[in-house]
């Protein structure tokens, strides 16, 4: 289930409050913060935005 574009626009990174970009990695969608570069998994169409679930990607 894809993330709605309007929903994506109101989400913010829980660590730095930066905006997200929807990315695909290894066949799975994730939200990538464009400010601090943390990636958060999307599980069953639901973003897991717990700070500990973010992985820094460069």
Image (cartoon, rainbow, N blue to C red):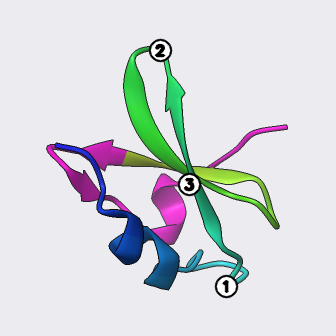
Point out the tag, 1 or 3, that comes first from the N-terminus: 1
Residue drawn at x 38%, y 75% as measured from the top left: 6
According to the picture, the residue beneath numbered tag 1 turns out to be 17
Whether 24 is among the magenta residues is no
Q: Who's the residue at 80% across and 63% down the image?
A: 36
- State the mark number for residue 26: 2
| Foreground tag (1 vs 3) | 1
Labelled pair 1, 2 in contact (Cβ < 8 Å): no
Q: Report the residue marked by disc 3.
A: 54
Q: Residue 56 got which mark?
A: none
Q: Using a 10 Å C-alpha cutoff, classify the residue at mark 3 as few (fewer than 14 neighbours), some (14 to 19) or many (20 or more).
A: many
Nearest to N terminus: mark 3 or mark 2: 2
Q: Give the extent of the magenta segment.
A: 42-58
Outermost residue to the top: 26
Which quarter of the image is occupied by the C terminus? top right
Instruction: Tell me residue 4's x, y (percent).
Output: 29, 62
Q: How much space separates mark 1 and mark 3, taking CA atoms?
A: 13 Å
């Amino acid at each position: 289930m894809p993330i709605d574009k309007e929903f994506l626009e109101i989400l913010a990174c829980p660590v730095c409050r930066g905006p997200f970009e929807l990315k695909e990695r290894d066949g799975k969608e994730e939200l990538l913060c464009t400010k601090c570069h943390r990636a958060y998994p999307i599980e069953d169409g639901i973003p897991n935005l717990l700070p500990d679930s973010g992985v820094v990607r460069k």
